[in-house]
Structure formats: C-alpha cells, structure tokens
Image (tube, helix red, strand yellow):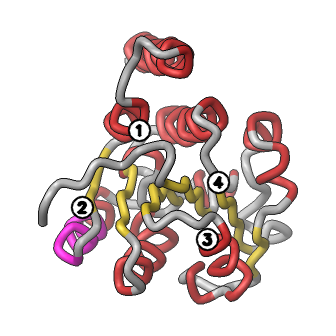
C-alpha cells in the first residue's frame, strides 16, 4: 500500500466511544495515557480547524458518558454527537454514516474505545466504502494485549494504516513553524512530558 499523506484540509477526525465506563475496561494501555491521546486529537482538530465526528454507545448504561473534556474542547461536535443504542459498527448507524459523509472528507483519522470492538468494525467498513483510514492505536485500547494486537493486525491487513497520536498529528500539521504548528507542538510536548513523569 503506497503512502498518501493526510493533511488537515482533507481529513476528518472520528472519535468513537471515549466513554468513562468503556475506557475503564481497557488494560492494554494505561487509562491516563489513552485519555491524554484522545484529548490531544480533539485539540489538534480544534487548532487545525478540522471536522470532527463524535459518537457514543448507550451512555445511560455501563458504558457511561463521553469524556466531559471533549465538550470543553469541541462543544459543537459534542452537542452534535451521534448517540447509538447498541449498534456495534458505528458505520452501520445511518446517523453516524451521514455525519461522516457530511464532513466531505475521504481521509478519516479514527480513534475508538475499544480497538477490538468499537474501532475495528467502522474502520474496516470505511475502507470498504472507499475512505482512506488511519487508526490512532494509542488513543484507544482493548481489555487484553492480545485482543489489541489482533485487532490492529487485522485492520492493517485490510488496508487501514495503523498510527499513533503524535505521529498522526505531526503528519497533519506538516510544519511546526506555522502558528497552528507552534500551538500544537506545545500541546504534544506537554503530553509527552506528562507521560514521562508518570512512567
């Protein structure tokens, strides 16, 4: 598969099920690291003025509410989030699929919780529909390491580019010397310093 650069002008960010309950089931990556990466993607979208689609599943049940910080960073996307009731593959939810299509972007940067359920199926579905898909693996996770590894390998074998949060943001930014790049590099460095301090 050839390399095609994702740019802020041709990519939408899709954040799937970053809910307190669902995130608490993840063991393949520390909770704080996963949360930090998801919020970093949200901040990047805001700074780069990229379209964002948020979705949640069964917020009133054990999955719980979306991260409240997403409402602070992306209030419009949060208010417009697609609330699914039990549909596993979010791309099979007509409201979600319509929201993704409405971005007008053929490149999707997806992050979801969990990678082995919430992320894999919409990512595979989107590839089949002709989208170019990258998955930020470390802005999600799975209940076990093997579940995460298998999901990421299956996605990669099916045409999804598996990436990391910082790698994706660097690709989208392209130039740290721009005003947006300067703002983002501060956010990225801050996140890395937090990670190192918690290690």
Name the side, left or right, on which 176 lies relative to 101: left
Residue placed under numbered mark 3 in the picture: 100
Label pair 1/4, CB-CB below 8 angstroms: no
Residue furthest left in the image: 1
Q: Nearer the viewer, mark 4 or mark 2?
A: 4
User: The residue tagged with tag 1: helix, strand or loop?
Assistant: helix
The image shows residue 168, relative to residue 129, as above or below, that is above
Quarter of image, res 62: bottom right
Magenta region, residue range: 150-158
Q: Nearer the viewer, residue 94 or 137?
A: 94
Q: Earlier in the sequence, mark 3 or mark 1?
A: 3
Label pair 2/3, CB-CB below 8 angstroms: no
Measure how far apart labels 3 and 1 are at the Cα level. 18 Å
Residue placed under numbered mark 4 in the picture: 52
| Residue count near mark 4 (Cα–Cα under 10 Å), binned few <14, some 14–19, many ≥20 | many
Exactly how many numbered labels are in the figure?
4
Q: Earlier in the sequence, mark 4 or mark 3?
A: 4
Q: Earlier in the sequence, mark 2 or mark 3?
A: 3
Q: Residue at x 47, y 33 (%)?
A: 33
Label at residue 154: none
Q: Nearer the viewer, mark 2 or mark 3?
A: 3
How far across and how far down the image is residue 192, in percent?
41, 18
Label at residue 149: 2
Q: Residue at x 36, y 78 (%)?
A: 127
Q: Nearer the viewer, residue 130 or 90?
A: 130
Residue placed under numbered mark 1 in the picture: 172
Magenta-drawn stretch contains 72: no
Q: Residue at x 79, y 56 (%)?
A: 65
How far across and how far down the image is residue 112, in percent?
52, 59
User: The residue tagged with tag 3: helix, strand or loop?
Assistant: helix
Q: Earlier in the sequence, mark 4 or mark 2?
A: 4
């Amino acid at each position: 598969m050839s390399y095609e650069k994702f740019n802020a002008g041709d990519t939408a960010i899709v954040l799937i099920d970053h809910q307190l309950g669902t995130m608490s089931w993840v063991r393949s990556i520390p909770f704080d690291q996963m949360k930090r990466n998801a919020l970093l993607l949200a901040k990047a979208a805001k700074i780069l003025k990229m379209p964002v689609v948020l979705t949640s599943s069964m917020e009133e049940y054990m999955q719980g509410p979306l991260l409240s910080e997403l409402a602070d960073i992306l209030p419009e996307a949060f208010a417009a989030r697609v609330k699914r009731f039990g549909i596993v593959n979010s791309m099979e939810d007509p409201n979600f699929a319509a929201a993704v299509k409405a971005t007008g972007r053929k490149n999707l940067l997806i992050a979801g919780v969990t990678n082995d359920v919430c992320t894999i199926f919409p990512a595979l579905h989107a590839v089949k529909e002709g989208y170019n898909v990258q998955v930020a693996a470390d802005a999600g996770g799975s209940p076990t390491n093997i579940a995460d590894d298998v999901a990421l390998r299956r996605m990669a074998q099916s045409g999804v580019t598996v990436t990391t949060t910082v790698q994706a943001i660097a690709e989208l930014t392209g130039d740290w010397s721009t005003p947006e790049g300067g703002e983002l590099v501060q956010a990225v460095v801050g996140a890395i310093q937090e990670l190192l301090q918690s290690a």
